[in-house]
Image (cartoon, helix red, strand yellow):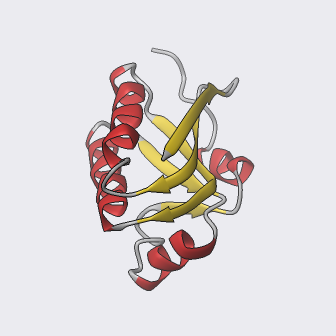
Amino acid sequence: MIQFTAQTLPDGIRVISAVGQLDENTSRDFFDCLEEAIEQGQRRIVVQCAGLDYFSSVGVSVLIRVHSRMKKLGGDVKLAALQGGPAELLRITHLDRVLGVYPDVAAAQAAFGPPPDPA
């Protein structure tokens, strides 16, 4: 089971907190949650992973898909507070270098830099 909560920070960054396990049974819900934010025009997303205690290769593929889509749209998705097995999986596969991984939401937020000027 997995649960999501979302909030938008004052600088417009959407933070999606995931709690539970990201696997073949929950990856569709995770993808739908991220896709909804993208469809709403979000181009700066942080996935807060402190409550995420497991993810499978299917979960990793969702992260890669969303990362690739955001890059094409001129945005980015960053991971914050990744711990335990999920952090180790990304480290071993070197995906931590591709997917921006930060110790906490504040560090991920700072990595985005200042908010873009409204057009």
Q: Residue at x 55, y 72 (%)?
A: 87
Total marks in image: 0
Quarter of the image where the C terminus is located: top left
Q: Is residue 54 visible?
A: yes
Position of residue 101 measured from the top left corner of the image (x, y, whole percent): 56, 63
Q: Quadrant of residue 94?
A: bottom left
Along the viewing direction, whichever of 78 and 86 lies nearer the viewer: 86
Q: Residue at x 73, y 48 (%)?
A: 106
Along the viewing direction, whichever of 22 and 114 lies nearer the viewer: 22
Q: Going by the image, does 24 lie left or right of 55?
A: left
Residue 97 drawn above or below residue 9: below
Along the viewing direction, whichever of 90 and 75 lies nearer the viewer: 90
Q: Residue at x 55, y 75 (%)?
A: 85
Position of residue 30 measured from the top left corner of the image (x, y, whole percent): 40, 42
Q: Is residue 14 visible?
A: no
Residue 12 drawn above or below residue 19: above
Residue at the farthest top position: 119
Along the viewing direction, whichever of 21 and 6 lies nearer the viewer: 21
Position of residue 16 measured from the top left corner of the image (x, y, whole percent): 56, 38
Q: Quadrant of residue 50?
A: bottom right
Residue at the farthest bottom position: 92
Q: Residue at x 33, y 23 (%)?
A: 39
